């Protein structure tokens, strides 16, 4: 049981570390954490490009996502386009103006990865990613069985 608690606590610490690093970018570009999170999400998750995707995968509140998307749109950092098949669905695309932020986020992710996996061999890293994929697959199946998103 203690291993599960440690695992959950560690997940929270990882998120805290990432968010603290992302906050540094917020200062440099006068962004809110929600805005920086959305830029990072859209850049790193091709094909996941709607507000609903951000709400689902980043577990953010709809109202926060809506406000941040509107702010990013007003600042010219993202565009919105209606889905051709489902007119209710709006796709979000980062603009060229977001490129300097994206480049900084790429550097942050490289630094984050270095911090997170410091002292871990390539073999250990590969084993971790294999196990993590299995945990992800198991979690998806378990949440589907329980009717969760």
Image: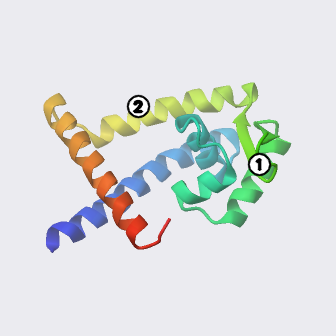
Q: Position of residue 104 (x, y in %)?
A: 56, 30
Does residue 14 appear anywhere in the picture? yes
Q: Position of residue 96 (x, y in %)?
A: 73, 25
Query: Dot 1, how many residues are within 10 Å of its Cα: few (below 14), some (14-19), or many (20+)?
Result: few
**Residue 34's image quarter?**
bottom right
For disc 2, the marked residue is 110
Q: Nearer the viewer, residue 30 or 36?
A: 36
Residue placed at 72% from the left, 65% from the top? 63
Q: Position of residue 117 (x, y in %)?
A: 26, 39
Does residue 119 appear anywhere in the picture? no
- Left or right of 75, for residue 15: left
Q: Is residue 109 above or below residue 70?
A: above
- Left or right of 34, for residue 15: left
> Looking at the image, is mark 2 or mark 1 earlier in the sequence?
1
Q: Position of residue 64 (x, y in %)?
A: 69, 62
Q: Is residue 40 above or below residue 98?
A: below
Instruction: Report helix, strand or loop for mark 1.
Output: loop
Residue placed at 57% from the left, 43% from the top? 41
Q: Nearer the viewer, residue 16 or 24?
A: 16
For disc 1, the marked residue is 86
- Left or right of 88, for residue 132: left
Residue placed at 24% from the left, 62% from the top? 7
């Amino acid at each position: 049981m203690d291993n599960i608690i440690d695992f959950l606590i560690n997940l929270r610490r990882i998120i805290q570390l990432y968010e603290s690093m992302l906050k540094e970018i917020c200062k440099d570009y006068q962004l809110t954490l929600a805005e920086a999170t959305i830029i990072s999400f859209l850049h790193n998750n091709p094909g996941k490009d709607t507000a609903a995707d951000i709400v689902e995968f980043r577990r953010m509140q709809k109202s926060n996502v809506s406000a941040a998307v509107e702010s990013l749109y007003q600042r010219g950092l993202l565009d919105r386009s209606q889905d051709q098949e489902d007119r209710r669905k709006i796709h979000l695309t980062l603009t060229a103006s977001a490129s300097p932020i994206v480049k900084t986020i790429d550097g942050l992710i490289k630094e984050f990865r270095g911090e997170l996996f410091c002292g871990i061999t390539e073999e250990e890293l590969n084993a971790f990613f294999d196990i993590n994929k299995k945990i992800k697959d198991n979690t998806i199946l378990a949440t589907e069985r329980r009717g969760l998103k």
